[in-house]
Amino acid sequence: MSSTYRTAPARTVESNGVTYAYRELGPKGGVPVVFFVHLAATLDNWDPRIVDPIAANRHVITFDQPGVGASTGSVPGTIEEMAGDAYAFIRALGFDTVDVFSFSLGGMVAQALVVKHPELVRRLVLTGTGPKGGKDIDKVAGTTYYDILRATLTRSDPKEFLFFERDAAGKRAGKAFVERLKERTVDRDAEIGLGAFQAQLKAIKRWGHGAPDDLGAITQPTLIANGDHDRMVPTDLSHDLHRRIAGSQLVIYPGSGHGGIFQHHEEFAPVAVDFLGR
């Protein structure tokens, strides 16, 4: 098993007619940590400064949802269906208990998974995300398209605008993050297609308009983290999750946005490692 995400081998597994692309690293054995990725993201969008510290002592698995990256199939119309696909992927690997690390859209999918299959998840990390029916989640698409336009006009990566503040510190952090995503130079994943991206946005909008789930039923230890100025999935929604999930731990990083955990990876990675290792 690889010890770094940069060299983690690409693998596939089939379930219900879908071939899932995934990578794994770290020592095998025990409960694995499965990573649920964000909007428009593929296997190449995980920050190695988050993945590698967790994989130092844990079996880590990242995967592409159906219709995304190298996975076959198509993007479903709802978050709940995405959660069903995640469940199928995890069970296809033979696991009946996992820890979940999630970011943004992945955090919505993780919530839906825990609500439907609470027996599967032991510990839960929700970052840069919000609850079903949460205030202004339905505006994610508008913010996304606006920042894509701004990035195009400045020949920048959209994540520099979507994830980071536009002050000096945020600009430095954004460029450093984008460079870290390029550290893997071979066997890179296919980028998401436009149709799949639009389908994800529509699913997020439905999630925002949906009736709230009873998150009080979540009894798993839960770590919630975000920046203090998240424009994509407003930071208030992280506080909302914290109120709804009894006993949850909340970490908010100052001077940062949606990608606060990536900007403050040096502080956040040890927190995540400690939480998942308890």
Image (cartoon, grey):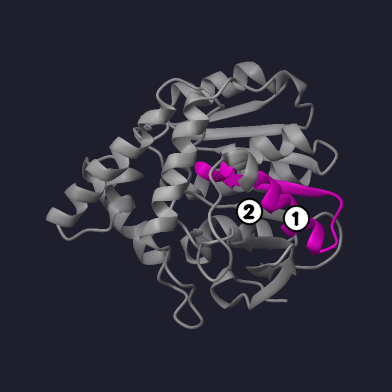
From the image, tell me which residue sits under label 1.
88
Label 2 sits on a secondary structure element that is strand
Q: Quadrant of residue 55?
A: bottom right
Does the magenta-highlighted stretch encompass residue 104? Answer: yes
In this image, 210 relative to 227: left or right?
right
Relative vertical location of residue 243 with respect to residue 190 in this rendering, above or below: above
Label 1 to label 2: alpha-carbon separation: 15 Å
Q: 224 or 131, which lies in front? A: 131
Residue type, numbered disc 1: Ala
In reply to whether residue 258 is colored magenta, the answer given is no
Whether 156 is drawn above or below 190: the answer is above
Position of 223 compared to 260: left or right?
A: right
Per the rendered image, the range of residues in magenta is: 83-107
Q: Position of residue 66 (x, y in %)?
A: 59, 60
Question: Reading the chain from its start, which is encountered first: label 1 or label 2?
Answer: 2
**Residue sitting nearer the eye, 56 or 259:** 259
Q: Position of residue 197 (x, y in %)?
A: 41, 53
